[in-house]
Image: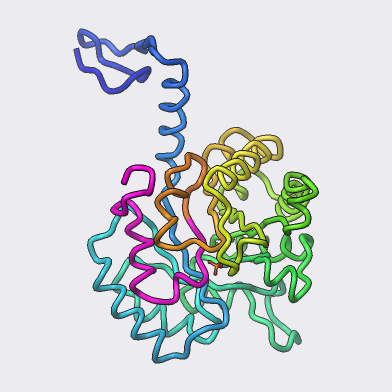
């Protein structure tokens, strides 16, 4: 008799059958189920460099990072530099698994849109991801969820992965409106897409009050918001999207808190600003599994 895992298909006396397992602890079954679903979502550690660095610093970073993380294979690593560095960075990372993404995009294909960059252009310089609706875009540049929706569509049409950012402001959290804000942003940002398209997206939950402030949401606060988003995805699409879509947390993530955040069952990765700017701290974020989380110290 060959047992593979609890409750899975087993081979008993040469015949396949479903083994029914009695779980001692009622939560054990739930935990195992969550672990199984989580295993379908590859962890993603993404650096959002915002408006920082010049070309020489970008290339030095890439050379150093490649060497340092050559042995890492269980985490997907992404760097999102400013537009001018996308081409040079993706060329210098060609011989590594590190991916390159953009911080924004315009939804038109081409034409008289001075200062804008299209999804096709990003694809042509080696981008595989594009951040859309980052809180700085929403709040400094006035990007609406409807515009985020058009940008997401353009990214999907060029076969790249959109990272759709959402998050509440401090006053909205204090007014207990977090879920209402997330519902509004996600419903509008993903409007009109079918479940196959939704499956190609990543969501980043970044509470505005935690971005660049040093205030991180606690791991439980973040996980609660992620759990809410996951259930919303079930309602808007289906169970598969709910189980498979990766949801990243962002907002003052640093080497000291990454392991604790990543231990939460609904947090599938991190979108990091400040702490992604030096190779030392970015490497520590990528190696979050090796960090000893505070609770276990
Ligand atoms: P932060 O930024 O890590 O500096 O808080 C995160 C983000 O804006 O994506």
Residue 141 position, x and y percent, is: 75, 76
Total marks in image:
0
69 up-or-down from 238: above or below: below
Left/right of residue 16 with respect to residue 274 in the rendered view: left
Measured from the top left, where is residue 17 in percent x and y? 33, 11
Q: Quadrant of the N terminus?
A: top left
- Left or right of 123, for residue 197: right
Given residues 123 and 68, the one toward you in this image is 68
Residue at the (27%, 59%) spot, across then down? 72
Residue 70, quarter of picture: bottom left
- View quadrant of ligand 1: bottom right
* Left or right for 154, reference 127: right
Viewer-side residue, 142 vs 195:
142
Residue drawn at x 71%, y 39% as measured from the top left:
236
Position of residue 78 relative to residue 264, above or below, is below
**Please, which colouring scheme is shown?**
rainbow
**Residue in the image at 52% along x and 65% along y:** 129
Horizontal and vertical percent for residue 132?
64, 65
Q: Quadrant of residue 185?
A: bottom right
Residue 153 figure quarter: bottom right
Residue 223 x, y percent position in the rendering: 56, 43
Q: Is residue 201 magenta?
A: no
Q: Which residues are magenta?
A: 270-297
What main secondary structure does the magenta stretch of the protein show? Answer: helix
In this rendered view, identify the residue nearer to me: 236 or 157: 236
Please state if 196 lies on the left or on the right of 188 as rendered.
left
Compared with residue 102, is residue 161 higher up or lower down, i.e. above or below? above
Q: Nearer the viewer, residue 117 or 73?
A: 73
Is residue 150 positioned above or below 84 on the image?
Answer: above
Say which residue appears at 49% left-offset and 61% top-offset.
253
């Amino acid at each position: 008799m060959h047992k593979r895992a609890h409750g899975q298909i087993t081979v008993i006396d040469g015949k396949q059958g479903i083994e029914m397992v009695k779980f001692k602890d009622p939560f054990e079954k739930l935990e195992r189920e969550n672990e199984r679903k989580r295993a379908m979502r590859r962890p993603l550690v993404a650096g959002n460099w915002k408006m920082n660095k010049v070309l020489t610093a970008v290339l030095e970073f890439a050379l150093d990072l490649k060497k340092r993380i050559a042995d890492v294979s269980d985490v997907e690593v992404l760097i999102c530099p400013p537009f001018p560095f996308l081409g040079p960075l993706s060329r210098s990372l060609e011989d590594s698994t590190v991916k390159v993404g953009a911080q924004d995009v315009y939804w038109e294909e081409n034409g008289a849109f001075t200062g804008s960059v299209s999804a096709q252009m990003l694809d042509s310089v080696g981008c595989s991801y594009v951040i859309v609706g980052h809180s700085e875009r929403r709040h400094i540049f006035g990007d609406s969820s409807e515009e985020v929706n058009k940008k997401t569509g353009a990214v999907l049409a060029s076969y790249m992965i959109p990272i759709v950012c959402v998050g509440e402001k401090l006053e909205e959290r204090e007014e207990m409106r977090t879920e209402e804000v997330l519902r509004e942003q996600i419903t509008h940002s993903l409007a009109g897409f079918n479940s196959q398209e939704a499956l190609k997206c990543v969501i980043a939950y970044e509470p505005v009050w935690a971005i660049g402030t040093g205030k991180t949401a606690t791991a439980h606060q973040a996980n609660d918001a992620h759990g809410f988003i996951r259930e919303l995805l079930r309602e808007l699409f289906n169970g598969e999207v709910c189980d498979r879509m990766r949801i990243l947390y962002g907002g003052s993530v640093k080497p000291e808190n990454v392991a604790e955040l990543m231990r939460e069952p609904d947090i599938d990765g991190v979108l990091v600003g400040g702490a992604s700017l030096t190779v030392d701290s970015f490497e520590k974020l990528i190696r979050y599994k090796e960090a000893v989380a505070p609770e276990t110290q």
